[in-house]
Amino acid sequence: MSACVMIVAGAALTTGAGSAGAAPQPSAAAAPTAQPTTDPSAEPTATADPVDEDFCNDAVRAAIDSGDAEAVVVAAGGGEAFREGVVSGAADGCIALNHPAWSWVVVNKQRPIEPIDFAPATVSPALYSPIGATLTQAAADALDELATAVDAAGQGQIGLFSGYRDYTSQGSAHDSLVDQMGEEAAEQTSARPGYSEHQLGLAADLVSCEGQSCGTIYDFGATPQGQWVDENAWKYGFIVRYGEHGSETTGYESEPWHLRYVGVELAKAYVDGGYETYEDFWGLPAATEYAS
């Protein structure tokens, strides 16, 4: 892990250098060209006064300093304890949900990426991608483990249809859908630039494949691969971000192909708690419309 120094609630860390997901078929020529952001955001403001040292203890602060998001969640007592700390405000002195360097970040129509043109460092997963899509290192490693498990379970192969898209590429994808469908329909399936999880490098649109012959994202949910992923993705740190239920909260249609990497601990807490949206998981309001 190298390249970008981030500041999180006073702690310096180093991070590895939509569908809300849906988009027209991408091409290799549309690969992102933005360079990793060297200073992704200002220091999040701690709102706890005084800081809750029971949550923001030495172990949590040491994990923050390490830059390992999963280690931070473990140090806080696991996924559910971490969630409770954030929801209750106990974590306010050391954890921020708006910081793009952390895998727990929340981005939706009411919560743009800060800064809006944030660009993470990304790598290519080993699994097949028709366009050579990339993800952050942690998300790429986890997706490769998931792909191996799908195949080992006898369900076939999966491919990465779309991963990281920079601000400009997301804008092109969104505008193309608006031209095809009109704004109202397009914005039920595609995020505006600066509001897409793909720009974080943490979102993966999957397709079922046989070798290098792959289906479409729209077919994925009904395939053996899609059904296995729906039941088991959490074991590898992913949630299905836009499930069958929850459009009234997210503002997006169901997208069984769109996985969001959050880390194993938080993904387990999400599934164990029976949550249907990431907003509900964090106790956040619905985000069906853009603020402006």
Image (cartoon, grey):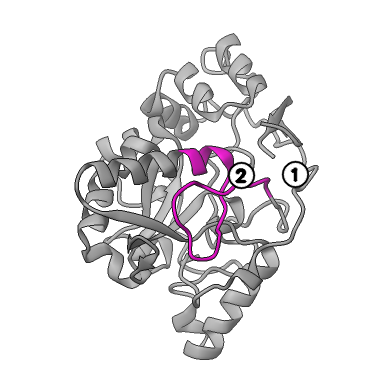
CB contact under 8 Å: marks 2 and 1: yes
Q: Is residue 12 left or right of residue 261?
A: right
The residue nearer to you, when weighing 282 against 131, is 131
Q: CA distance from mark 2 to mark 1?
A: 9 Å
Q: Which residue is the extreme one toward the front?
A: 211
The residue nearer to you, when weighing 251 against 240, is 240
Q: Is residue 282 visible?
A: no
Magenta-colored stretch includes residue 137: yes
- Residue designated by label 2: 98
- Residue designated by label 1: 41
Q: Which residue is the extreme one toward the top?
A: 58
Residue 26, horizontal then vertical, whole percent? 54, 73
Name which residue lies at 76% across and 48% down: 37
Quadrant where the C terminus lies? bottom right
Q: Which residues are magenta?
A: 120-141
Q: Is residue 71 visible?
A: yes
Answer above or below: position of 83 versus 108.
above
Element carrying mark 2: loop
- Asked which quadrant contains residue 93, the reply is top right
Name which residue lies at 54% across and 63% down: 109
